[in-house]
Amino acid sequence: MEHPVKHDGHLNVNAITNSQFSFDKVKEIADWILERVELRPKIGIVCGSGLGGLGDRLVETKIFPYSEVPHFPKSTVVGHKGNLIFGKLNDVPVVCMQGRFHAYEGYSNALCTMPMKVFKLLGLESVILTCAAGGINQSFEVGDIMLIKDHIAPLLWTLQNPLVGHNDDRFGPRFPAVNRIYTKHYRDLIKEIASEKSLELKDGVYSSLGGPCYETVSELRGLLQLGADAVGMSTAHEALVASYCGLKVLGIALITNKAVIEYDSENYPNHEEVIDTANRRAKDLEELVSEFVSRTFVQKVDMNNNEMSK
Ligand SMILES: O=P(O)(O)O[C@@H]1C[C@H](O)[C@@H](CO)O1
């Protein structure tokens, strides 16, 4: 069993720790990848349930099934292929997780969020998190695309928060601020792109519970009262760790089903509907993300050129 080691070399044996993914272990994963891939992307994409088509859009790819990547577990959920793909999207180098890890698969939140730390050590600056979610906001329709402006994640209020334990400040600070996780500039940019494409984009608060069960009517009513617009089982903890690691975050939820907030309704959520809606709406979401990736990259190149010519 690995001891929690501070990076100054001091043992911190009394801390409950998430030594499961120490800096050295994450570095081992990142180094393994860097030895095998020439591409050096600045943007990472995580594909939610049924949204793996984004990965299929990449060209000049190098694909690693998760089973080949050191310390990566299996992706066990339908609609999550389980590939780490390096390639170009709209001519921009990206790395794409075709499928994510969920706590309900039996994985710790430290493990579920480990890829964000790997992204940091790969030199990424930004991550785009996509997910499927149930619409709690009663004005939302199935198939709506919701830009995540904030999240409510009760599990992150507990010791299940992946940042609990020994903090290695090479990843991020002990006490990260979380009031600006979803980068404003990115939200503005994607709204602009959606409006140019005449694509309606909802703006909302994503809430996440642990799953794998969907929510009770009373839980959903409670989340609505708290200000949530959509509910899912992922994303918030990844966004937290990405932001803690200094990555800029864009979060997009596809409303795959309406959350049932009427007692005794005949309707009920199910994963088949989630996947069907994702398949039906994936194209618009993929185009939005592709355009976002290329504009972000162009802006970055512009900024660098301007800086260099100063
Ligand atoms: O990985 P995401 O959050 O997109 O997947 C959602 C949550 C569950 O994994 C599943 C429920 O249908 O879809």
Image: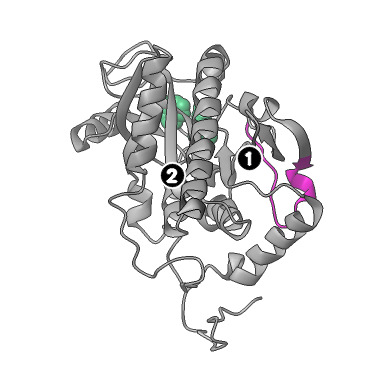
Q: Is residue 221 above or below residue 165?
A: above
Q: Residue at x 55, y 32 (%)?
A: 294
Q: Closer to the camera, 77 or 196?
A: 196
210 magenta-colored: no
The label nearer to you, 1 versus 2, is: 1
The residue where tag 1 is placed is 94
Local packing at callout 2 (Cα closer than 10 Å; few below 14, some 14-19, many 20+) is: many
Furthest-front residue in view?
309
Q: Position of residue 164 (x, y in %)?
A: 42, 66
Q: Amino acid at mark 2?
A: Val
Q: Residue at x 68, y 34 (%)?
A: 88
Q: Is residue 186 above or below residue 201?
A: below
Q: Residue at x 73, y 45 (%)?
A: 66
Decide if residue 271 is in sight here: no
Q: Which residues are magenta?
A: 63-77
User: Which circle marks residue 249 in the picture?
Assistant: 2
- Circle 2 — which element? strand
Q: Position of residue 105 (x, y in %)?
A: 59, 43
